Image: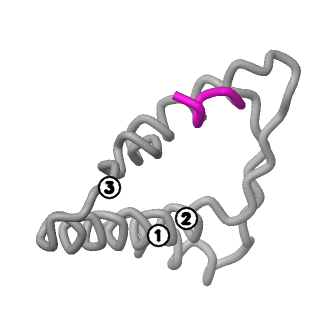
Amino acid sequence: MCAEVVFRLSDCIFVIDEPTAIEQTLANFYERLEERFAEINEHDEIGLEPNELFLSVEELREKLNNQKRIELRALGKTAAETDEQFQTL
């Protein structure tokens, strides 16, 4: 998969700003991809399935867990509440 090329780099550090917000954005993105693919199939048009183009949320999380990374998160009570809300979704 082309999406995996970046994970083959041995000397890199991922900087992830607001991981919970990114996860929510990705969830919305993947949902829209699935909807769009269903529309394409419904009209008998040609298109690749989203999993043929992108890593799933689980695959991405697994790959990132094995990489050096810095996660930037907001601090304080509000940030903790926000993180808690996203984890329960």
Return the residue at label 2: 20
Spatial CA span between label 1 and label 3: 25 Å
| Residues drawn in magenta | 1-6
Near mark 2 (Cα within 10 A), the count class, few <14, some 14-19 or many ≥20, is some
Kindly identify the residue that appears in the image at 38 percent across and 40 percent down.
52
Residue 14 percent coordinates (x, y): 78, 41
Element assignment for label 1: helix
- Residue plotted at (61% across, 83% down): 78
- Mark 1 or 2: in front is 1
Looking at the image, the residue that sits furthest to the bottom is 78
Q: Position of residue 43 (x, y in %)?
A: 15, 73
Question: Is there a contact, CB below 8 Å, between mark 1 and mark 2?
Answer: yes
Q: Which mark is residue 47?
A: 3
Question: Is 69 left or right of 49, judged from the image as shown?
Answer: right
- Graded by Cα atoms within 10 Å as few (under 14), some (14 to 19) or many (20 or more), the crowding at tag 1 reads some
Instruction: Say above or below: 10 vs 28.
Output: above
Q: Amino acid at mark 2?
A: Thr
Are circles 1 and 3 on residues that touch, CB within 8 Å? no
Helix, strand or loop: magenta stretch: helix
Camera-side residue of 22 and 80: 22
Residue that badge 1 annotates: 24
Say which amino acid is labelled 1.
Answer: Gln
Q: Quarter of the image holding residue 6?
A: top right
- Asked if the residue under mark 3 is in contact with the one under mark 2, i.e. CB atoms within 8 Å, the reply is no
Question: Which kind of residue does numbered mark 3 sit on?
Answer: Gly
Number of marks drawn? 3
Q: Separation of disc 2 and disc 3 at Cα? A: 30 Å
Q: Name the side, left or right, on which 66 lies relative to 49.
A: right
The residue positioned 55% from the left and 64% from the top of the image is 20
